[in-house]
Amino acid sequence: MSNGTNHVGSQLKKEFPAKYQNHESSDCITMVIWVLQHAFKERGLHDVAKKIGTLGYKGTELARYLINTHNWNGVYYNPDVNHPSDGKGEHNASYYNQVKRNCTYSVGKVPTSHKLINYRPSPNKVTSYLPLTEKVTIDYNKFKLIPFGVGLPKGGTHCWLYSYGKVFESHWDREFSNGLYTSIPLNQFPWLSGVIITPPNSKSLLNIAEVKCA
């Protein structure tokens, strides 16, 4: 993997193949696969790196593989489980109908063992019969100590990298010089619910609320 200066968003390369013929295409899942493969190769686990290369078509498949086969941890995140700031019911449903009920996230059934919730409550009600959410930052501050993770919001239709409280994304419609790769604090991230999977060696740092499903 290069330093990224010759990378371009995969959608741009698809639309303008001649212009970007000497560029390597990047997008969210490609970036995640690159980094994971590099990490496993560095540990001498070339078979695992090869397997990961076959899982780039669906983030939830990748997450289940890492959790079920390599003991990674699934951490559900949602800044406000009752009043999502974008007003979309998918965020309430992912918590109450999936995580709390089945200890899994999305229809892809990604196992979740911990939760990181209510760290950025909305000032406005979405669910009228519930009070405004009280802000809880203890777990969020603890989770900022986690050095690495892979995030999957919106049922796994997007993915990104996580490190020490920040989200790192690749945007498929941008050039390197125009924000192909960006970072933003998790508590400012606009994708309001999802799962972050973390390696087994981070388990001692996961001193946050556990998921207890029905």
Image (tube, helix red, strand yellow):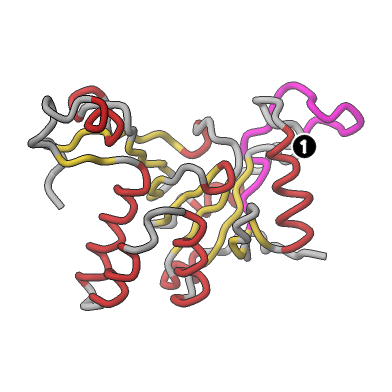
- The residue positioned 77% from the left and 64% from the top of the image is 213
Residue furthest left as drawn: 22
Q: Total marks drawn?
A: 1
User: Quarter of the image holding residue 86?
Assistant: top right
Q: Position of residue 41 (x, y in %)?
A: 21, 70
- Residue 127 among those drawn in magenta: yes
Q: Is residue 110 left or right of residue 185?
A: right
Q: Which residue is mark 1?
A: 82
- The residue positioned 65% from the left and 54% from the top of the image is 107
Q: Position of residue 133 (x, y in %)?
A: 77, 35
Give the answer, above or below, for where 76 lies relative to 92: below
- The residue positioned 23% from the left and 22% from the top of the image is 178
Q: Is residue 43 left or right of residue 5?
A: right
Amino acid at circle 1: Asn
Q: Is residue 182 left or right of residue 150?
A: left
Give the answer, above or below, for where 111 lies relative to 31: below
Residue furthest right as drawn: 129
User: Predominant secondary structure in magenta?
Assistant: loop
Give the answer, above or below, for where 61 lies relative to 133: below
- Residue 103 among those drawn in magenta: no
Give the answer, above or below, for where 48 lies relative to 55: below
Of 13 and 165, the residue lying toward us = 13
Q: Is residue 72 left or right of residue 75?
A: left
Q: Which residues are magenta?
A: 115-133
Q: Position of residue 151 (x, y in %)?
A: 47, 49
